[in-house]
Amino acid sequence: MKKLIIILCCSVFFITAEAQLLKKIKDKASKAVSGENKNETKSNDAGSSQNSSPANTTDNSDNTTPPPGSTKAFTLDAGETLMYDESEIIAENNNVGYRIITQNRKYEYFLIENGQKTGPFKQPPGRTRVSKDDESANESSFKTKSSGNGPDPVAAQYSKTIDGKLYIVFNAKNYGPYDFVSLMLASPDKKRFYAVVVSGSDNPMMAKMGMGNCYLINEAQLKQQIGKGMAMGMSLEASSNFKYCLAHVMDQQDQKIKAFTNNGNKQEYSMTEMYTSGNNMWLDNNGNIVTIPPQSPTQVMVNGKEVASFQVPVTNRNNLLLTPDPKYSVYYTEGKIYKADGSMEDASNILFPRLGVVNNKAAIFWLKAYKNESGGKDVYVCKKEL
């Protein structure tokens, strides 16, 4: 009899616990859909990119006055929510632009770009700056994979054998002939390209395997040898404005990685340094090679020279902003802004911050909705110079 009573009590306990758990899940889901989870979202990384979720449509509105220097971008429609981490603020020398994504109750998406609203869309409109690993105004937008991981799809798309010789055929024009097309990138408008090609080698067999004299070429008569003698193309990337490119080749003689840009910048790495650097090596929009040394991650190097140093390791390059005057460079992490001059500012009250340049100095930008007199919500682009 006692055993029966214990079993019945346990059954009641688990049924009650399960009902309470289901109620909590249901309540949380309802809050997420209605935008009531105001205090449940926290971001440690500026410019972080996540899938659309309640975490990036947080209400974040209040009745206070926007800070000085804020600009009203638009007014949210009834039932419309702001998707913070899908939106962009791009600031360069007093030119501030924005691409804001919103979602309505029908799960339709809208784009507000510098005052103009378009949509609805079935999916969030793509960002203007898209990279291999993550979206960022500081990252290169276009990057190939290593040629050692199989044929480069862009090179294969534009390569064509004509009369037994290999050419790049781009916009009805032939470039070549070459022994091998290792890597290639085409601009989004398909008007420009960069490629690493092999022309000449110790023997024809090696050349057709992608090993030989490597050249960086484009549609505008660029033909720049990268490396000396036997080399193999490893990677190719272009800046987000497609004005500059960076090629890595492996020199077969000393087994070192040689990095070259189309504007003359160079660096050299060991195989270990290249692979341990990973995403801590990239090309900026000025054609510079930016590196965070894995052995000293508080340093930021540009073309092999230190330009900034911070109190904490730079682990997310999306949150790093290098300014024309290096002493104003900043790094954001865990709600704090670290400056290259050694000082620090608290930014824990800012949701999804973006970094930009105003008057050649760093500034922090963010989006916030403020309730207006009619009860609606106006979205402002807020800023604070650092």
Image: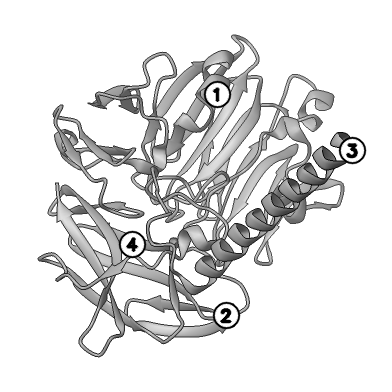
- As shown in the figure, which amino acid type bears the numbered disc 2? Glu
As shown in the figure, which amino acid type bears the numbered disc 3?
A: Met
Residue at label 3?
1
Q: Compared to 26, does 361 lie above or below? A: above
Which class describes the residues within 10 Å of circle 1: few (<14), some (14-19), or many (20+)? many
Circle 4 sits on which residue?
Answer: 89
Say few, some or many: other residues with alpha carbon within 10 Å of mark 2 (under 14 / 14 to 19 / 20 or more): some
Residue drawn at (64%, 31%) of the image: 233
Q: Name the residue that disc number 1 marks.
A: 227
Comes first in the chain, label 4 or label 2: 4
Residue 123 spot, x, y in % from top left:
61, 72
Residue 253: % across, % down: 63, 10
Amino acid type shown at disc 1: Gly
Residue 344: percent from left, percent from top: 17, 34
- Please name the residue shown 55% across and 84% down the image: 120
* Alpha carbon distance from label 4 to label 1: 39 Å
Q: Is residue 340 visible?
A: yes
How packed is label 3: few (under 14 Cα within 10 Å), some, or many (20 or more)? Answer: few
Q: In the displayed structure, does residue 145 sit left or right of residue 341?
A: right
Q: What element carries label 3?
A: loop
Q: Which of the two residues, 368 or 13, is positioned nearer the viewer here?
A: 13
Labels 1, 3: front one? 3
Query: In the rendering, which numbered label is found on residue 108?
Result: 2
Residue 371 is situated, as x and y percent measured from the top left of the image, at 25, 78
The span from disc 1 to disc 2 (Cα, nearest Å) is: 51 Å
- Circle 4: residue type: Ile
> Which sits earlier in the primary sequence, circle 3 or circle 2?
3
Render colour scheme: one colour
